[in-house]
Amino acid sequence: MYTKFNENYKLEKWYPAEYSDLCSMYDIISIKDLIEGLFIELVPDSVVDSENEKYETIYIHWPGSYVSYMVSDNGARNLINLDKNNHRWTFFKIMDSKYVDFIIKDSCGVEGDNLEHFCIIGTNSIIDVLSPYEPQILDSNKKPIAGEKEWEE
């Protein structure tokens, strides 16, 4: 199912690593671009306190390389994560992305056939990541969630 936002892209709700037990909203606490990959630290930030207490900090991790990422203030796209019932969600893929088109045209040799645009809409900021593969979801100890291979420092 797609939610049309504007002529630049369509949003598709995404469940990272097919992991469906996630808080509805997270805030982006840190972004670390390391040799081991890109790490995005997220803390539960729902308007419902009991939901925040139920969930823990998670990390979204693209091991190795990714193509590009961009961080922006949430005010620029404040309402795009609302569904028709005014429920918020944090994780999306963007279809027909102008960002993907821009990176392909502006780069030297980046192929876009399998490039996906992931959009993590936090409470206060948004990060867009272009990668040919889905990230891992790690718990607060950087251990894989949903049976993924363990990340090694």
Image (spheres, grey):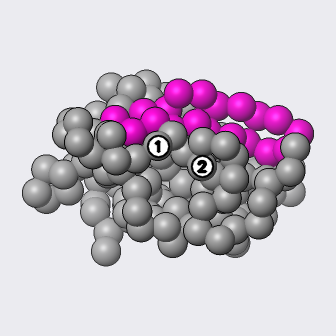
Label drawn at residue 56:
1
Residue 132, picture quadrant = bottom right
Cα distance between the residues tagged 2 and 1? 8 Å
Q: Position of residue 99 (x, y in %)?
A: 57, 48
Q: Residue at x 69, y 53 (%)?
A: 143
Q: Which residue type carries mark 1?
A: Glu
Residue 1 position (above or below residue 29): below
Q: Which residue type carries mark 2?
A: Asp
Q: Residue at x 43, y 25 (%)?
A: 73
Residue 31 in the magenta stretch? The answer is yes
Q: Nearer the viewer, residue 31 or 72?
A: 31
Residue 40 position (above or below residue 63): above
Q: Position of residue 123 (x, y in %)?
A: 35, 32
Q: Label 2: state its secondary structure.
A: loop
Q: Position of residue 60 (x, y in %)?
A: 61, 48
Image-based side of 70 in relation to 13, left or right: right
Q: Residue at x 80, y 45 (%)?
A: 37
In this picture, which residue range is highlighted in magenta? 26-45
Residue 101, picture quadrant = bottom right
Q: Residue most toward the left?
A: 85
Q: Which residue is mark 2?
A: 139
Residue 72 at least partly seen? yes
Asked if disc 2 and disc 1 are in contact, CB closer than 8 Å, the reply is yes
Q: Residue at x 86, y 57 (%)?
A: 109
Q: How many marks?
A: 2
Q: Earlier in the sequence, mark 2 or mark 1?
A: 1
Residue 38 in the magenta stretch? The answer is yes
Residue 130 at least partly seen? no
Q: Pick the quarter of the image with the N terminus.
A: bottom left
